[in-house]
Image (cartoon, rainbow, N blue to C red):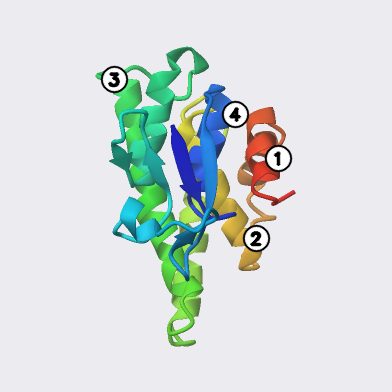
C-alpha cells in the first residue's frame, strides 16, 4: 500500500490511520502546485483530481477520498478499533462524524486557503468554523474521543482540521473539551509518528 501526501494537508488523516493501525506502507510526498511526486512522477497519472490523499492498494486500485481511505485502512486492522464493524449502528455513527468533518469543517476551510477569496468573505467562513468547532466541543463532553472511549479514524481527521485552525489563528482555548481532546490525540504514538514522518514536529 502506498499513500501520496502533502505535509499537513488532509492526507495527514490516512497517514495517522496507517500508523495507528500498524500497517506496513509506503508514503510519497507530492508537490501539489507542480503536480509531481518526490520521485519526479506525474501525480495526475495517479490521481487525475490532482489532490491528496491518493492511496494505492496492493492490487493497484487507487482510492482518492479521505473518508473512504481511512475506513479501508481501519478495516485492514480490525483489532485496532479504528472503526466499528461494518453494518453496525456504531459504524454509521463513525460515518456520520466523518461526513460532518468533511463537509462542515474541511470544506469550510477551502476559502481561507485560496488567495482569490475576497477578504470580506473570510470572516464569514471563520465564524462558520468557530460555530462548528463549538458544536464538537459540546459533543465531546464526557467523552475521550468523538464516538466514546476509543480513538477512531474520525478523531484523526478532526485532529488535522484542528491543526488548520491553529494555522489560521482560530482561537479554541475557550473550548475546554476540544482542547483536552486535542492534547489527548496529539500524545498518541501513531499520531506522533505520522507528524514526524511529514516533518511537522
Q: Are the residues tagged 2 and 3 within 8 Å (C-beta)?
A: no
Q: Is residue 198 above or below residue 48?
A: above
Quadrant housing the N terminus: top left
Whole-angstrom CA distance, mark 3 to mark 4, is: 22 Å
Q: Given this view, does label 3 or label 1 mark the residue nearer the observer?
A: 3
Q: Quadrant of residue 63?
A: top left
Q: Name the residue that disc number 2 marks.
A: 166
Q: Name the residue that disc number 1 marks.
A: 183
Whole-angstrom CA distance, mark 2 to mark 4, is: 21 Å
The residue closer to the viewer here, 177 or 27, is 27
What is the x, y in percent for residue 165? 59, 60
What is the x, y in percent for residue 102? 38, 50
Q: Label 1 neighbourhood size at 10 Å, few (<14), some (14-19), many (20+)?
A: few
Whole-angstrom CA distance, mark 3 to mark 1, is: 29 Å
Q: Label 4 neighbourhood size at 10 Å, few (<14), some (14-19), many (20+)?
A: some
Q: Is residue 73 above or below residue 88?
A: below
Whole-angstrom CA distance, mark 2 to mark 1, is: 13 Å
The residue closer to the viewer here, 5 or 140, is 5
Q: Name the residue that disc number 4 marks.
A: 144
Which residue lies at the image location 29% right of the left edge and 20% below the top edge? 86
Helix, strand or loop at disc 4?
loop
Q: Name the residue that disc number 3 marks.
A: 86
Instruction: Identify the mark nearer the N-term, 2 or 4.
Output: 4
Which residue lies at the image location 39% right of the left edge and 61% below the top edge? 107
Q: Are the residues tagged 4 and 1 within 8 Å (C-beta)?
A: no
* Position of residue 40 in the picture relative to residue 64 (left or right): right
What is the x, y in percent for residue 94? 38, 31
Q: Given this view, does label 2 or label 4 mark the residue nearer the observer?
A: 2
Helix, strand or loop at disc 1?
helix
Amino acid at each position: 500500500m502506498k499513500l501520496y501526501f502533502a505535509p499537513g494537508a488532509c492526507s495527514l488523516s490516512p497517514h495517522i490511520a496507517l500508523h495507528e493501525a500498524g500497517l506496513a506502507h509506503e508514503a510519497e510526498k507530492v508537490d501539489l502546485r507542480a503536480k509531481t511526486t518526490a520521485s519526479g512522477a506525474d501525480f495526475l497519472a495517479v490521481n487525475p483530481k490532482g489532490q491528496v490523499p491518493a492511496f494505492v492498494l496492493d492490487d493497484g486500485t487507487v482510492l482518492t477520498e479521505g473518508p473512504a481511505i481511512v475506513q479501508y485502512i481501519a478495516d485492514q486492522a480490525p483489532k485496532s478499533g479504528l472503526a466499528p464493524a461494518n453494518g453496525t449502528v456504531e459504524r454509521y455513527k463513525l460515518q456520520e462524524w466523518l461526513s460532518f468533518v468533511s463537509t462542515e469543517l474541511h470544506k469550510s476551510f477551502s476559502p481561507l486557503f485560496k488567495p482569490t477569496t475576497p477578504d470580506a468573505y473570510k470572516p464569514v467562513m471563520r465564524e462558520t468554523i468557530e460555530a462548528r468547532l463549538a458544536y464538537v466541543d459540546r459533543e465531546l463532553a464526557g467523552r475521550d474521543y468523538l464516538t466514546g472511549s476509543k480513538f477512531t479514524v474520525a478523531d484523526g481527521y478532526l485532529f488535522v482540521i484542528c491543526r488548520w485552525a491553529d494555522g489560521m489563528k482560530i482561537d479554541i482555548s475557550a473550548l475546554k473539551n476540544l482542547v483536552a481532546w486535542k492534547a489527548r490525540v496529539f500524545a498518541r504514538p501513531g499520531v506522533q509518528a505520522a507528524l514526524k514522518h511529514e516533518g511537522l514536529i
